[in-house]
């Protein structure tokens, strides 16, 4: 089999159903399967998918793993990985939609570039504007600024410009350090080599960890505007309140820095946690809209 597409669903049955429809509508020239891992959705997602996509399930092209608990993003992706049969893997969010035969283009690129371990494509918001999905590796200074929410106002600072890749040209193929986990096209063999997604992370920062592991394994990460996918970003996690999101993000940051940075850097970020929570509470109280995942 050429490709296994793995998506983790949580309470977005109509969006994941639209994603599935678009995959089967536009994907041609590939032997592929779609694996949906449902994280104990309470909106009837599993029954909805089984009723509306019965033919694809019956012929084995669509597989559904129905969890009776919310396993988080990394663990759920690994559940899909365990049953995947494709030479290539695509981990993509459920709130996406294809508009062309994107998978074939990416597969052909990967066939020709064995040094590349992860590829991502151009992501568009629902209004067709380009979504930032590339960053540089995180460092203490830029993450301290993020915790203090200064990236909202001071994104022109050199440290933040470097981290957020404000100079990035989304019209050009480029090797990069880090891509958003919303759309990761990779190799089954490589995922087995690095052990899949690191389950120390429940949600957020698991993609940063994966990109680091892929680079350390000697593979490149590349951004490819040869195709584009619509991303109606954050629809699952939008159901979680602001302070809970911030704590989840912060926890992932601390896990990453404890693993890969100095005790000093880890300690500084730990010390900033209460300030980060307070600032989040204030923005939530005054109903200040937070930035999207791609901008932090």
Image (cartoon, helix red, strand yellow):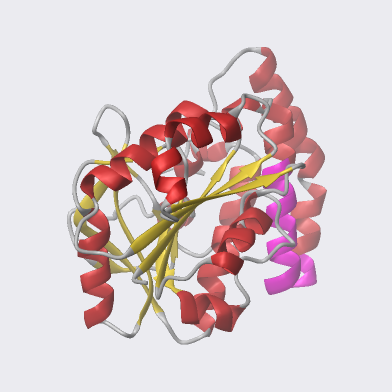
Q: Is residue 170 above or below residue 219?
A: above
On the picture, is 64 further left or further right than 162?
Answer: right
Q: Quadrant of residue 89?
A: bottom left
Residue 56 in the image: state x and y as whole percent.
40, 46
Residue 289 seen in this snapshot: yes
- Which residue is depicted at the point 76% across and 36% down? 275
Image label count: 0
- Which residue is depicted at the point 63% across and 50% down? 73
Q: Is residue 175 above or below residue 166?
A: below
Residue 140 seen in this snapshot: no
Magenta region: 248-264
Quadrant (top left/top right/bottom left/bottom right) for the N terminus: bottom left
- Which residue is depicted at the point 76% across and 33% down? 277
Q: Quadrant of residue 201?
A: bottom right
Q: Is residue 251 magenta?
A: yes
Residue 50 in the image: state x and y as whole percent.
52, 36
On the picture, is 212 further left or further right than 75?
Answer: left
Q: Which is more toward the observer, 170 or 82?
A: 82
């Amino acid at each position: 089999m050429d490709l296994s597409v793995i998506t983790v669903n949580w309470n977005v049955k109509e969006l994941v159903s639209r994603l599935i429809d678009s995959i089967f509508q536009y994907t041609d020239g590939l032997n592929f399967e779609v694996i949906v891992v449902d994280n104990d959705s309470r909106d009837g997602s599993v029954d909805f998918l089984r009723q509306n996509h019965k033919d694809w399930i019956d012929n084995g092209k669509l597989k559904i793993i129905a969890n009776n608990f919310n396993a988080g993003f990394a663990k759920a992706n690994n559940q899909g990985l365990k049953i995947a049969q494709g030479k290539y893997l695509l981990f993509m969010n459920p709130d996406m939609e294809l508009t062309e035969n994107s998978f074939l283009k990416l597969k052909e690129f990967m066939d020709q570039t064995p040094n590349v371990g992860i590829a991502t494509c151009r992501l568009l918001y629902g209004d067709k504007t380009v979504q930032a999905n590339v960053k540089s590796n995180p460092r203490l200074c830029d993450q301290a600024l993020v915790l203090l929410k200064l990236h909202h106002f001071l994104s022109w600072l050199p440290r933040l410009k470097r981290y957020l890749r404000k100079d990035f040209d989304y019209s050009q193929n480029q090797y990069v350090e880090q891509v958003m986990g919303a759309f990761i096209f990779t190799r089954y063999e490589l995922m087995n080599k690095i052990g899949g997604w690191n389950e120390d992370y429940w949600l957020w920062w698991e993609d940063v960890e994966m990109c680091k592991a892929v680079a350390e394994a000697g593979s490149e990460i590349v951004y490819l505007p040869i195709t584009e996918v619509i991303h109606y970003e954050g629809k699952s996690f939008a159901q979680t309140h602001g302070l809970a999101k911030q704590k989840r993000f912060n926890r992932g940051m601390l896990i990453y820095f404890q693993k890969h940075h100095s005790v000093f850097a880890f300690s500084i970020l730990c010390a900033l946690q209460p300030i980060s929570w307070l600032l989040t509470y204030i923005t939530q109280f005054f109903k200040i809209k937070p930035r999207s995942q791609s901008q932090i």
